[in-house]
Amino acid sequence: MPEALPVATIRTQVTVPLAFPDGYTTTARVFTFKGLVDGREHLALGLGDWAGALDRLAVGGEAPLVRPHSECLTGDVFGSERCDCGPQLREAVQRIAETGGFLLYLRQEGRGIGLYAKLDAYALQDAGLDTYQANVALGRGEDERDYTAAAQMLATLGVPRVRLLSSNPDKAEQLTRLGVDVAERVLTSVFLSPANADYLAAKAAKAAEVEAAEAADELAGRAPERPVSR
């Protein structure tokens, strides 16, 4: 059974023109919320013909393209090449704008551990740990992100069904458990560079591990087990 979600409401909405360093421009309708379970200042960006996408969904048409994107100050703002977050954000904005949908900008820096802890994890990665091992070495979870607020935002916007723009199976599993109908998972591109090769390899291995565990749980007829975030 899907988890019952507390009701959130739209706090305000405003139109914001967006411009990226490579010259790409578009316009977003930016929504803020009240009543999100974690109290953080998450945003929803309506891109392209997002209103038309909602209308089509309401009459049984295709689900809008949606990406939950976790904040990454170093990648999104400063262009760090230690991860692929900046290029993924840029790609997501354009792909969603072309079809109409939403980008959920979630304030979950460092897979939920925060900016300072993420930089501490970078130092451990420089000493030989991968991105998940470094989090654990700091006494944190491998991935502490929780998508309950994302599900609340989608419910508030009237988006019960999505085409999920993500290569992370955990996002799909969490959103499904929270009552969001993930009609399709649309994979993101791979943005490989010499600086992030090890990081991307660790992400790919973790995604494969999660999908294998989910397949085993499905065959066994039991609900997938989720690690406890610390």
Image: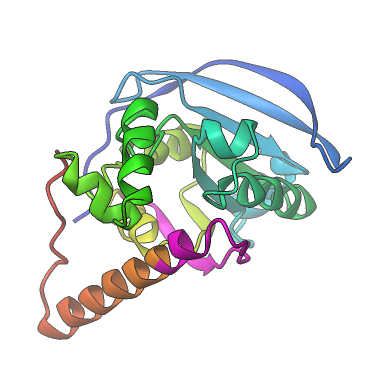
Query: How many numbered circles does the render carry?
Result: 0
Q: Which residues are magenta?
A: 179-201
The image shows residue 109, relative to residue 128, as above or below, that is: above
The image shows residue 39, relative to residue 99, as above or below, that is: above
Q: Is residue 222 visible?
A: yes
Q: Nearer the viewer, residue 83 or 177?
A: 83
Q: Where residue 224 appears, x then y in whole percent?
A: 16, 66
Answer left or right for 223 relative to 214: left
Answer left or right for 135 relative to 26: left
Answer left or right for 158 relative to 102: left
The quarter holding residue 128 reads bottom left
**Residue 136 on the magenta span:** no
Q: Nearer the viewer, residue 200 or 70?
A: 200
Which image quarter holds the C terminus? top left
The quarter holding residue 201 reads bottom left
Residue at 63% x, 31% y is 77
Q: Where residue 71 appears, x then y in whole percent?
A: 49, 35
**Residue 183 on the magenta span:** yes
Q: Residue furthest front?
A: 127
Q: Residue furthest right?
A: 23
Q: Nearer the viewer, residue 39 or 20?
A: 20
Q: Where residue 29 appears, x then y in whole percent?
A: 70, 28
Q: Where residue 207 appears, x then y in whole percent?
A: 36, 68
Q: Is residue 111 visible?
A: no
The quarter holding residue 80 reads top right
Residue at 12% x, 47% y is 228
Residue at 72% x, 40% y is 47
